[in-house]
Amino acid sequence: MLNKNSASSQSLPRVHSFFNMIPSIMQDDLAVTILADRDNMFSIKSQRSHGEDLIVTPFAQILASLRSVRNNLLSLTNVPASNKRPAQSSSGRSGNASGVQLAQGDEAYTRLATDTIEELDWCLDQLETIQTHRSVSDMASLKFKRMLNKELSHFSESSRSGNQISEYICSTFLDKQQEFDLPSLRVEENTDHPTSTQPVNPQYPRSRSPRGPPMSQISGVKRPLSHTNSFTGERLPTFGVETPREDELGTQLGELDTWGIEIFKIGELSCNRPLTCVAYTIFQSRELLTSLMIPPKTFLNFMTTLEDHYVKDNPFHNSLHAADVTQSTNVLLNTPALEGVFTPLEVGGALFAACIHDVDHPGLTNQFLVNSSSELALMYNDESVLENHHLAVAFKLLQNQGCDIFCNMQKKQRQTLRKMVIDIVLSTDMSKHMSLLADLKTMVETKKVAGSGVLLLDNYTDRIQVLENLVHCADLSNPTKPLTLYKRWVALLMEEFFLQGDKERENGMDISAMCDRYNSTIEKSQVGFIDYIVHPLWETWADLVHPDAQDILDTLEENRDYYQSMIPPSPPPSAADDIPQDEKIRFQVTLEESDQENLDELEECDESESRGDAGSSTTTGTGTTAQGGGLAGGGKPSGSQNQAPHGGM
């Protein structure tokens, strides 16, 4: 993990990562560098270089504890370790680190034996509560949700804006539809503006999308799908677009391998075709047109057609955003830790997914489409509505004459690429964020704890997991860019949110969190967004490719500091502060029924732990969280000599 005490981050201790509140256990300093071995087996090899790692995912914690038990037993019994699984003393925390032989009856022997039994009991407790139908990543995801729920509950009680931001985070970034107990959320101060609490005018029916073509047909949300024939001659533009400022454009595109390029300038110089010129230049520089046998003219035909199906009226979700995500994906694929890891087909699939990931976006959220019973929501059964639509539109456009860029691929290659693209684009559904983060963190920590120091990427599941997170990071990269770019993206995104809120107000619908232009705290929302969503994701990515992403993390923390400094001062105390505790705004995430049963078990473990004097509390930047430990939040034995107690990262 990123060491918060490293020289590069000491100046910014104020950033409170979501992982800070997760009970964790210490692991050896493991930096992760990805390489390919002599047999072309892709792997991630650990090297000690960036401070102590803290294991926070449940399955990895169990593995670490069992390894601790094994090392302790070797010390207690003086049995030589087998060559198959030698004792791991590299962490310096083995049961008998001094190497002195322990004699039965000695105080050190008795203490180590007691610690070992406690460690083993803790492992058994966790294993006995595991539900066999759940994957190890589900266990981590549930744990993360629980801790996020606790933190946001406190954050939401601090103010009305805190409540609104908490609602936005949970409704957007958790993978189950949430219910909220927010009886006092509606703001009454802005009486000049209609709010969602007004009764719906019976003459103004609830908004529904206009009836389109039969649901068996794929169509655009604004207009029918069409074909752009831009290139009739033999000569293709140098950068894929016709522009009178080609030299200036070439200068900007020469920085495509740089994080935080002037993407808005590229949009201007390319005559509002940033996606086409960015994608064409990247595919050419990577020689993907050659390796994937893509005819350049066909590629440009498809890209111009694709770009025409991004809705230009959207302030944020337009082709400029797609170009930005594609360029960010390109930079992340260039990270030294990933050199030689992915095949041209995988690289091309990730870049293609970034290009298409928001095509024909209507500028509305999935939840709006579901709430308004739109045709798209009905077609896709309310599940990742927009992401499914983006994929359907993109693959439909490939069927246009002269647009099939994969026409020369073998059938198996084409099927593999299509599967990869589908998986990656579906993972850009922000409601999948917590599960995606838990998957990556579990994979990395489990392999590191296994002791070999090597994380093999030798199967499709692990490889696509890294690519999904890579594109997800690119999609959530605005807060990691230079501040001037970040502020511009924030303004555009908030305007798109406000336009949706205007539509909801006009149609008598409940106004979604952060979509009310008369009642939103932009600065505070960005701080919460970074603390709970962006920083944990980038911190995990930085752990995977350490130290390649350190500069990105530093910029993220600086931007967070800026928005923190811009939060308006709190208003003076009012009569509202005297409201009895029972009547104050309450915020609660309600998970699916099976998850709730597990959370009840977790709470019981916490209560028993607090009665047993095992829990202590620590205060973070946004609230107080209880430090427990383990798979279900239960107390992790802290007396083991070869492992430090659970603690924040």
Image: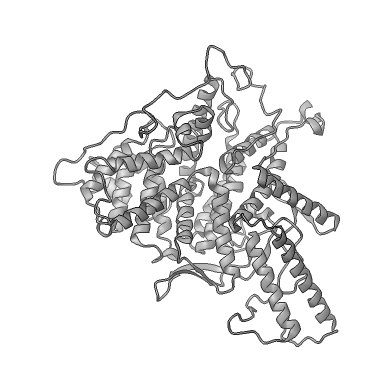
Residue at the extreme left of the image, as rendered: 234
Q: At x 72% / y 46%, what residue is drawn?
A: 623
Picture quadrant of residue 3: bottom right
Nearer to us in this view, 25 or 86 = 86
Q: Note whether residue 22 is visible.
A: yes
Nearer to us in this view, 70 or 252 = 70
- Tell me: residue 16, above or below residue 107: above
Residue 543: x and y in percent read 55, 62
- Left or right relative to 320: residue 644: right
Q: At x 54% / y 46%, what residue is drawn?
A: 432
Quadrant including the N terminus? bottom right
Residue at the extreme top of the image, as rendered: 203
- Tell me: residue 254, above or below residue 443: above
Q: At x 81% / y 51%, what residue is drawn?
A: 607
Q: At x 51% / y 34%, what residue is drawn?
A: 494
Q: Note whether residue 557 is visible.
A: no
